[in-house]
Structure formats: structure tokens, C-alpha cells
Amino acid sequence: MTNEGTLYGVVGAYTFREDGQSSLARFGADPNDALTLEGRFSFGEVDYDGSYMDGTPLSTDGIDDFLFDIRLLWSREQPAAKIFNCVYAGLGYRYLNDDSSGQPGGYERESNYLYVPVGTRKDWRWKPRWRLSLTGEFDVLLVGRQISHLSDADPTLPDIRNWQWPGFGGLLSLELQHKGHNVDLGVAPFVRYWWIDESTVSDGYYEPKNNTIEYGLSFVFRF
């Protein structure tokens, strides 16, 4: 089965930096260290192309999807470094809700991923106010939890909860940024990927291995 569609969303982040008086300083942080709390929310509709459990083909349009991702990241800036100008790592939680319960034979699916992101960024600066940044990230799945509300499709069926592991993901992003007096503006094409292995079996049901590809364009405002 495949789901394809367009999602729209927003991303927000707040960064805590060591300034000599901050809580980071009390923990002995390097002046180039930072903690960032980051959240992403997106929503839209996707089209499903697959089959019923007995193999009968099924295609439906307009399935509601929404996704949110929240992460806490530690980073270290290295302005003079020749290879990477920033390295970071942290902990993230990703939730995807795919709700086809309004379609014949459809049901709500909830995907929960707890993962560790590890990434780097390389900057190229030219002129006083312009910067090009390439970010690469590798994500390691700690545990996944899939909840399938099969009772939406047939009241006689159970709701299934499966554990999924192992899995991994990745991110590649290229941002062009202009530094202003009060606000920095940027534009960043990106691609994200997830691969998750087959789940455990629960009540005779399991979630097959799957992969997800997201690609898009972000408009960035920094204060």
C-alpha cells in the first residue's frame, strides 16, 4: 500500500545559549553550546492505494493526516572549523495520525516513534549578510508503537497495538539565509526519510515494514 499527498505546516524553535549567567553556564557549558527546543506540526490529505486484508484492491482519496514532531537538541557551534560548523544530538518524538475511518473499510492509524537525532551543519558565507548552510542528520529509532483502530472498519475486530523496531531515518536540508537587523530570512528545500522494520505480532496482526519520504520547501524567519 502507498499513501501520497501534500501536507502544510509550521516549525518553531527556541534556543538557549550560554551567556555567563544562564542555567547552561551553571552546568559548565561551553560558550559555543546551546540547547534547542524544536517542534513541527503539519496537516493535509493523502490518497491511499492498496487492498483489503483479503487482497481485494482498494483506492481512496482525501484521507486526513496530521503529524507533529518535538525534539530537544544539544548543539555546539564551531565557526572556525573547516569541515563542520555545528554538530548536534538529542531526543525526539514523532507522531503521525492517518485517519481513513470516514472511508469504506478505513480506520484510524497512529504511529509513535521515539528516536535519537544526530546531525551536522556546514556553512558557507559570502558578503556580510548572506549564508548558505547544508544540514545532514541521521535518526536512530529507539522504539516505535503502532496503534491500529480496526474496530472503525468492523466493530467485531480488535484495536491492535504493535511494537516496531529497529528503524532509522535521515534529513538533508540546504538553506539560503539573509541576515537582517532584527529578523533573518531564509528559504530551505529539504528531504526526510524513515525506514521501519516489521512489527511484533498482536492478536494475529502485524504492521509490515515501511518507509516514508517527505520532501518540501521551508520559509524561515529567525528573531
Image (cartoon, grey):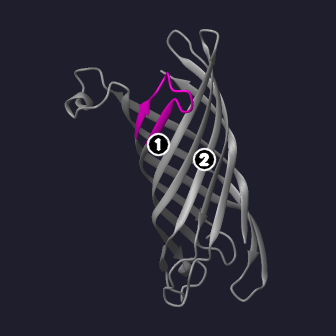
* Relative to 3, 140 lies left or right: left
Q: Is 46 within the magenta?
A: no
Of 64 and 205, nearer the camera is 205
- Residue pushed farthest left? 26
Task: Name the image quarter holding residue 35.
Answer: top left
C-alpha separation, residue under disc 1 versus residue under disc 2: 15 Å
Location of residue 176 with respect to 3 vertically, above or below: above
The secondary element bearing badge 2 is classed as strand
Identify the disc placed on residue 82. none
Q: Please, what is the three-letter code of the amino acid marked with disc 1? A: Gly
Identify the disc placed on residue 171. 2
Q: Do the numbered discs 1 and 2 sit on residues whose CB atoms are within 8 Å?
A: no
Q: Please, what is the three-letter code of the amino acid marked with disc 2? A: Leu
Of 60 and 14, nearer the camera is 14
Of 74 and 87, nearer the camera is 87
Identity of the residue drawn at 73% across and 59% down = 4
Identify the disc placed on residue 39. 1
Identity of the residue drawn at 71% across and 82% down = 52
Identity of the residue drawn at 58% across and 56% down = 169
The secondary element bearing badge 1 is classed as strand
Identity of the residue drawn at 60% across and 12% down = 129
Residues drawn in magenta? 74-88
Judge depth for marks 1 and 2 and give the one in front: 2
- Dot 1 crowding, Cα within 10 Å, few <14, some 14–19, many 20+: some
